[in-house]
Amino acid sequence: MSEITRVPLQPVAKGSVGKIWLGVIAAVLLGSGVAYATRYQGIEIETVKAGTGASPTKADVALINYVGRLASGKEFDRGQNAVLPLETVIPGFSEGLSKMQKGGKYVLEIPSEKAYGAEEKRNPQTGEVVIPANSDLVFEIELLDFRSAAEIQQQRMMLEQMQRMQGGAGGAEGGAPGGVPMPEGAPQP
C-alpha cells in the first residue's frame, strides 16, 4: 500500500472557479484558432483574430477600421483608417481598445452605462435618433496601429519645422532644402 501525502488546500474564492475555467477555455481556443470572448468590468471582447505586441493606453491615439451597431444589429456608424484618441471616446470603447493588440480583429460589446447611458445621439443633419437612450453597442474593430499622443505631437512639430525650413530657404521644388525629398505624405510647397 502506498502512502498518500495530504496537502491542505486553500479555499477557492467565490467566483474564482469560473475564472479558472474561463482561462482554461481561452487557452484551448487560442491554440485552436477559434474566436473567444473575455469580459472586462462590463464590456465583452470577442477576439476574432489575435493581434500581437503591446496594447494602447488611454494616452494613445489608435488607427482603426470599425463598424458600430446597436444590439439589434442596426448599423449606426462606420470608419476606415479612423484616428481616435482613446481619451476622447466613450469609456467602454477606450477600455476595450486598451485590451486589444495591433493587427487584431475584435468584436466589442459595450453596455449602455459604459456608452452613452440615458443620453440619445442624433444625426446632426437630419435630427434622426441614431443611438436611442440606454442602448448597448457592438463594434467590430480592426486595430491597425497606435501611437502615443506625445509621439504624434513630436512628429507634427518635426513636420512643421521642415515646412518652415522649406519656406524660408527657397529649397528645390518638391523637396526639402538641398534637394532632399520630403517624407511620403508630407505637404509639398
Image (tube, rainbow, N blue to C red):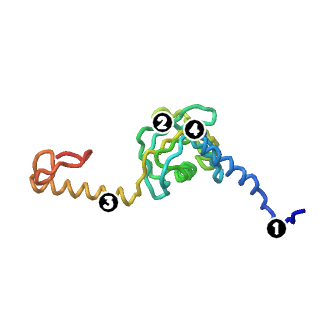
Residue type, numbered disc 1: Val
- The picture places residue 35, in percent across and down from the top left corner, at 60, 40
**Helix, strand or loop under label 1:** loop
- Nearer the observer: mark 2 or 3; the answer is 3
Q: Which mark is residue 154?
A: 3
Q: CA distance from mark 1 to mark 4?
A: 56 Å
Q: CA distance from mark 2 to mark 3?
A: 29 Å
Q: Residue at 53% of width from left, 41% of height from top? A: 49
Residue tagged by mark 1? 7
Q: Which mark is residue 187?
A: none
Which of 122 and 152 lies nearest the eye of the viewer?
152
- Of the image marks 4 and 2, the number of the one nearer the N terminus: 2
Asked whether, in this view, residue 107 is left or right of residue 1, the answer is left
Residue type, numbered disc 2: Arg
- Nearer the observer: mark 1 or 3; the answer is 1
Residue tagged by mark 2? 78
Residue tagged by mark 4? 131
- The picture places residue 91, in percent across and down from the top left corner, at 56, 52
> Is residue 84 in sight in this rendering?
yes
